[in-house]
């Protein structure tokens, strides 16, 4: 029977195109990589690679086994993630993922309050804008800012709406006079979003109010956009909950509420079997009923 580690080496050589490249990727001796490929070929009684001075190239048989090998790789990753999730569940640990702003302005407070009543439960934060795959166990619960969610396999609760607005720095406002209406946005340089934020309803509304020639800078994260706006380069779109407390920022024009995204609390039916996670998500949903006013601009 072949060894899974040999399949892993096979996939790495196929992707790198050489045993040297695979050895570097695997942090393994090149001779060991070659020996493992030879052992796999003997075990399968197939030639998986042709060799020449340019490197290793999959044979027809190697190409035919590539898909099945990648399936094994995915299954091994899923098994490892599920084992990790089970260890967290058994140990009373909950892994939360969310954008850094959302973690800082609400989740950390909710977790502190929850731990006061359930001190045996521990938490791990993964703060990033990229969405982790909670179905694969990369996190137990996610708090995501999104216009809508399409994944019907997840357990979703809409816990808040997020007001957004166009901001500038106080220094910029003093030098150039901050706009106060949407039709005044055309008179200023702006920083725009790229990546997933560019496709949000709030960003699409903002871009519909300006001309392309006004864009002097782009960013793919909210944290960086805030830094750009604070630098005085021009106008930028930011969530109100994390921008209103910053005295150096001046709110110019509020995005219409129908273009505002929502905060969703997501988990899976499998993760919800953990009494620790079930208790926490119920607690968080209840606390958001009070905290949601932080995310929605109060005039």
Image (cartoon, rainbow, N blue to C red):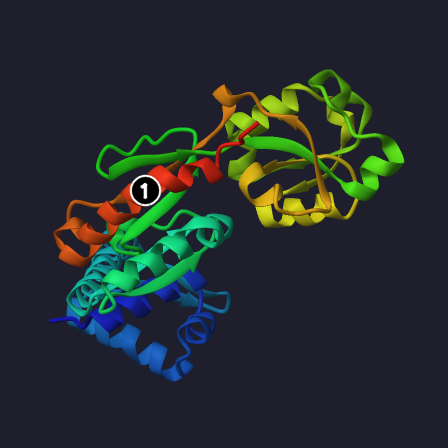
Residue 290 locus on image (x, y percent): 37, 40
Q: Left or right: 219 with respect to 106?
A: right
Residue 224 locus on image (x, y percent): 64, 49
The answer, for residue 64, to whether it is visible in the render is no
From what the image shows, is residue 155 above or below residue 78?
above
Q: Which residue is mark 1?
A: 265
Q: Residues within 10 Å of mark 1 (few under 14, many from 20)?
A: many
Nearer the observer, 6 or 180: 180
Quadrant where the C terminus sits is top right
**What residue is drawn where x is 45% and y is 36%?**
293
From what the image shows, is residue 146 above or below residue 187?
below
The answer, for residue 205, to whether it is visible in the render is yes
Nearer the observer, 88 or 193: 88
Quadrant where the N terminus sits is bottom left
From what the image shows, is residue 175 above or below residue 26?
above
Nearer the observer, 38 or 257: 257
Instruction: Give the SS element for disc 1.
Output: strand
Residue 8 locus on image (x, y percent): 29, 67
Nearer the observer, 40 or 128: 128
Q: Left or right: 146 with respect to 139?
A: right
**Identity of the residue furthest to the top in this view:** 183
**What residue is drawn where x is 60% and y is 49%?**
223
């Amino acid at each position: 029977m072949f060894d899974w580690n040999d399949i892993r080496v096979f996939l790495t050589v196929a992707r790198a195109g050489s045993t040297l490249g695979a050895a570097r990727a695997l942090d393994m001796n090149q001779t060991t990589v070659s020996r493992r490929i030879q052992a796999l070929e003997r075990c399968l009684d197939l030639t998986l690679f042709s060799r020449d001075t340019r490197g290793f190239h999959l044979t027809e048989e190697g190409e035919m086994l590539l898909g099945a090998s990648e399936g094994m790789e995915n299954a091994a990753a899923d098994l490892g993630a599920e084992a990790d999730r089970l260890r967290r569940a058994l140990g009373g640990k909950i892994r939360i993922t969310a954008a850094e702003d959302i973690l800082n302005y609400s989740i950390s407070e909710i977790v502190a309050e929850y731990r006061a009543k359930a001190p045996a439960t521990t938490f791990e934060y993964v703060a990033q804008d990229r969405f982790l795959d909670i179905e694969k166990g990369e996190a137990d619960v996610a708090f995501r800012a999104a216009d809508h969610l399409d994944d019907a396999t997840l357990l979703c609760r809409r816990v808040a709406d997020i007001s957004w607005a166009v901001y500038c720095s106080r220094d910029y406002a003093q030098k150039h006079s901050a706009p106060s209406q949407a039709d005044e946005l055309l008179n200023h340089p702006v920083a725009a979003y790229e990546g997933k934020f560019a496709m949000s309803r709030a960003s699409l509304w903002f871009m519909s109010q300006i001309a392309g020639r006004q864009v002097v800078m782009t960013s793919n994260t909210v944290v960086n956009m805030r830094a750009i706006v604070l630098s005085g380069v021009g106008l930028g779109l930011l969530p109100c909950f994390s921008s209103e407390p910053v005295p150096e920022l001046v709110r110019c024009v509020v995005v219409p509420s129908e273009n505002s995204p929502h905060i969703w609390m997501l988990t899976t039916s499998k993760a919800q079997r953990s009494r620790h996670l079930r208790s926490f998500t119920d607690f968080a949903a209840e606390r958001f009923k009070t905290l949601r006013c932080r995310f929605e601009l109060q005039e």
